[in-house]
Amino acid sequence: MSAIRLLLNVIWVFVAGFWLAVGYVIAGLICCLLIVTIPFGIASFRIAGYVFWPFGREMIRKPGAGAGAGLLNVIWFVVAGWWLALGHLFTAAALAVTIIGIPMAWANLKLIPISLVPFGREVVDSDRLTFTPVYRVPERQH
């Protein structure tokens, strides 16, 4: 499976990943110009790394992220999130035209929520990701 991930990531870098990551780096540099917006710059750089090499990694919610992350997400959405999401949407539409581009288009669509609300999330390897059930059936009392 890792050979397929490597192949998809290499193709991704050439067809979309490099340019999308450059967009996030530019957004991060702009955000780092002011001291107040440095957290936005750091988030942008973190997403740039994920956008550059996305296959085999997942973005999950951080446990314990609360109202602060929500407030930062609202500000992020207004300042940078919507135009970065548009970049993913337009890139996905262009990639979906070819058969080999369909998985790349799907990856772009999966990156849209992350580009809109990045705070309170972290990047993890898919191999180390464990799933826990949302609802557990209570054990019977005898």
Image: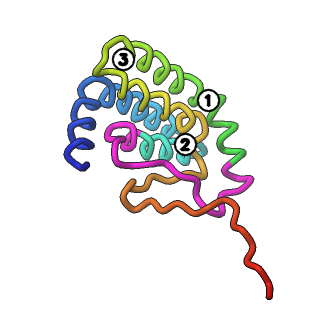
**Residue at 49% across, 34% down:** 110
Q: Is residue 124 above or below residue 3?
A: below
Q: Mark 2 highlights which residue?
A: 40
Is 71 displayed left or right of 93 in the figure?
right
**Disc 1 or 3, which lies upstream in sequence?**
1
Indicate the quadrant where residue 97 lies: top left
Disc 1 or disc 3, which is closer to the eye? 3
- Residue 86 x %, y %: 52, 20
Residue 62 sits inside the magenta stretch: yes
Q: Position of residue 20 (x, y in %)?
A: 38, 28
Out of 50 and 108, give the one closest to the viewer: 108
Which residues fall within the magenta stretch? 48-69
N-terminal label among 2 and 3: 2
Q: Between marks 2 and 1, how big is the CA–CA gap? A: 10 Å
What mark, if any, has residue 95 been given in the picture? 3
Question: What whole-number distance in Å separates the C-alpha atoms at marks 2 and 3?
Answer: 28 Å
Residue 113, quarter of the rendered image: top right
Residue at the outermost right position: 142
Q: Residue furthest front?
A: 142
